[in-house]
Amino acid sequence: MNHGGGEPSLASLIERSAELKRALVDFALSPRFEKHLEQFMLEAADPHQELSEGEAIGVIDRFALQLPQVWRCADRAGRARGGDETARPGLP
């Protein structure tokens, strides 16, 4: 799936991005974070405690991206590939 020069194709990058997003969402939806996610979603809901599908997706994405464990894993993965560090400043 690479075009000459060793760079990944756009299609392979999109496919990899989708795989990583699925893994990130699965991690955020794991039983380990269930209570935290539930509270996060309740805070984002309207007065009737309802969210549209699009709103729920956005809330889950924001929640997942705020998990320090996600940033540490991304940092380790980036270093393993020889890339730049991706962790937020101040996180171990």
Image: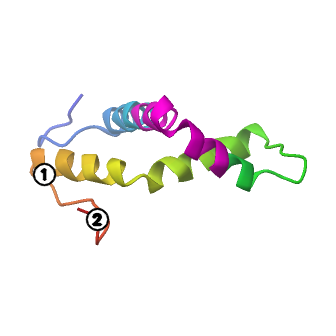
Instruction: Give the residue displayed 36% in from the left and 55% down from the top.
Output: 68
Q: Is residue 89 above or below residue 15?
A: below
Instruction: Give the residue displayed 54% in from the left and 47% down from the top.
Output: 61
Q: Residue furthest bottom?
A: 90
Magenta residues (range):
23-40
The residue pinned by badge 2 equals 91
Question: Main SS type for the magenta part?
Answer: helix
Q: Give percent across and percent down for residue 91.
A: 28, 65
User: Could you tell whether 78 is left or right of 51 in the image?
Assistant: left
Snapshot quadrant of residue 24 = top left
Circle 2: is it few (<14), some (14-19), or many (20+) Cα within 10 Å? few
User: Could you tell whether 61 is left or right of 57 in the image?
Assistant: left
Snapshot quadrant of residue 80 = top left
Disc 1 secondary structure class: helix
The quadrant of the picture occupied by the N terminus is top left
The residue pinned by badge 1 equals 79
Is residue 24 found inside the magenta-colored segment of the image? yes
Is residue 81 found inside the magenta-colored segment of the image? no
The mark closer to the camera, 1 or 2, is: 2
First of labels 1, 2 by sequence position:
1
Task: Report if the CB atoms under discs 1 and 2 are less than 8 Å apart.
Answer: no
Q: Amino acid at mark 1?
A: Arg
Disc 2 secondary structure class: loop
Circle 1: is it few (<14), some (14-19), or many (20+) Cα within 10 Å? few
Q: Amino acid at mark 2?
A: Leu
- Residue 58 vs residue 3, the one in the foreground: 58
User: Is residue 69 in sight in this rendering?
Assistant: yes
Numbered circles on residues, count: 2
